[in-house]
Amino acid sequence: MTEFPLMEEFDLSSLSLATSDDNGVHVHAAFELLKEAAVFGAVVASLRLQGEPLTRNRAIATGNLIRIVRLDRSMVAQVADGHGGDQQLALSRQLLDSAATLAYLLENDEEHGDRFDSYVFDSLIAEREFLKDVRDQVAKRDGTRLPIEDRIENSIRDTLLAAGLDESDIPSRRSNGWPSAETRMKLLGPVAYSGYRTSSGAVHGSFTDLYLHYLDFDESGNLGIRERAYPYVPQTLLTAGLLTVEAAALTLRSYIRPAPLELESAFRRLRSRLGQADTHHESAMRRVRLDGATASE
């Protein structure tokens, strides 16, 4: 098994004195912790005994973990290049989806092999419907095919091959059994589904998302266009980091037995430090609220 050095830890001592007026301090700490979480996730995803075959189910689980890591990297990149946080909730929703899917698939280890089948089918049902639309269009042209239609069919055929399935194996959507997002989100905690629903506005462009990220509302009650990017907030980065290390630990314990003590220790420490950073930020915001209330009296 290949050994991978983990990143040097970021020093959290600066957070003990920071207030929420120093939001940049908290964002910086959350940014550094998310980088560490992404490295931890990438290390876990890369672990495999030499010559060990990668089964379809393990590939699906590891693929979801790698997707989480890449979403982390997108968040990190947006903070680093000053792009701003306009897309932070949209990225968070995708990350929540993969984390909840992974938790559902690996619940009770791989005992529920049918869950992996349902996961694959849920995607391929949509592909089959797309394929039907393509074939209908070809039929309307008396069999004349466009190059893009050949590429679509080849792509779907390759996906079926990778899944080890034939088109005829795909069930109807009603009989597939893949659970709702709400059911999967419950595995991440009692408030995960609320966060998932809230972030849907960022994906679909709701008025709430426009108001929070793209419009200004002044004291006179006038709406205007927000030209500046919405800033990243620590909570988004810290939540992403926590979801990443939990997903990585679940994958590690499911496929690497016994799990290396160094990685188990790294997981516990990183999870603790993410919690510390969140506690510091909440305390800082509470201090500022209390100071503001006192000043107004």
Image: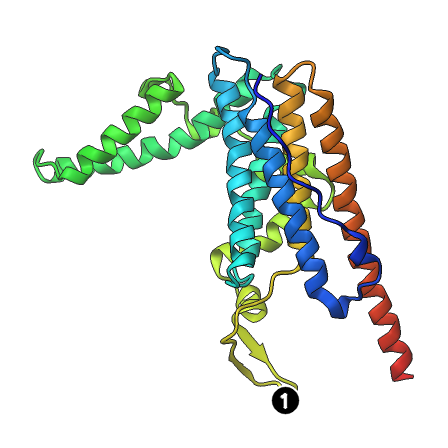
Q: Is residue 175 left or right of residue 254?
A: left
Q: Amino acid at mark 1?
A: Ser
Tell me residue 229's x, y (percent).
Answer: 53, 69
Name the quadrant of the C terminus: bottom right
Give the vertical position of 44 relative to 78 (above or below): above
* Residue nearest the observer in this picture, 219 or 15: 15
Residue of label 1: 220
Q: Is residue 154 above or below residue 67?
A: above
- Compared with residue 63, is residue 235 higher up or lower down, i.e. above or below? below
- The relative height of residue 221 versus residue 234 in the rendered view (above or below) is below
Can the viewer see residue 107? no
Secondary structure of the residue carrying numbered label 1: loop
Quarter of the image with the N terminus is top right
Residue 251 appears in the figure: yes
Q: Position of residue 33 (x, y in %)?
A: 67, 47
Q: Nearer the viewer, residue 232 or 107?
A: 232
Label 1 crowding class (10 Å Cα cut-off): few <14, some 14-19, many 20+?
A: few
Closer to the camera in the image, 213 or 131: 213
Which of the 4 image quarters holds residue 168? top left
